[in-house]
Image (cartoon, rainbow, N blue to C red):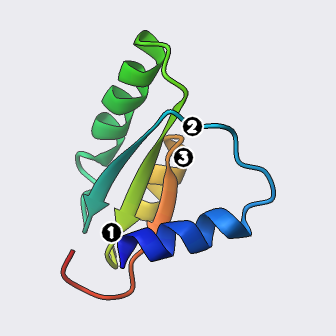
Amino acid sequence: MLENQVMADAASNEQIPTLELSIIMPCLNEAETLATCIGKARDYLERHKIAGEVLIADNGSSDGSQEIATNSGARVVTILERGL
């Protein structure tokens, strides 16, 4: 299910860089900790010179998590079906 959504979202992007690693984080109302978690993941990718992305699988957050994730440099995929 998540894989199908990610593939659909990837297909809709015009240009996707070659990735070595996607760090996928499930999310439901994680506004308090999300920016820190994304920052640590992005730092890891940079420190180890890995071409990667941080992908947030959001399951219907209502606390602004999607905006925080986007502003922190992550890609957000909305998961419509509850219960990751």
**Disc 2 + disc 1, Cβ < 8 Å:** no
Query: The residue under label 2 is which amino acid type?
Result: Leu
For the residue carrying disc 2, how many other residues have a C-alpha within 10 Å: few (<14), some (14-19), or many (20+)? few
What residue is drawn where x is 42% and y is 11%?
47
Name the residue that disc number 3 marks. Answer: 71
First in sequence: mark 2 vs mark 1: 2
Query: The residue under label 1 is which amino acid type?
Result: Asp
What residue is drawn where x is 36% and y is 68%?
58
Q: Determine whether, in the image, residue 47 is placed left or right of residue 7.
A: left
Relative vertical location of residue 68 with respect to residue 50 in this rendering, above or below: below
Q: Position of residue 27 (x, y in %)?
A: 28, 62
User: Which label was assigned to residue 19?
Assistant: 2
Q: CA distance from mark 2 to mark 1?
A: 30 Å
Q: CA distance from mark 2 to mark 3?
A: 20 Å
Q: Which quarter of the rendering shows the N terminus?
A: bottom left
- Tag 1, which secondary structure? loop
Q: Residue furthest right?
A: 14
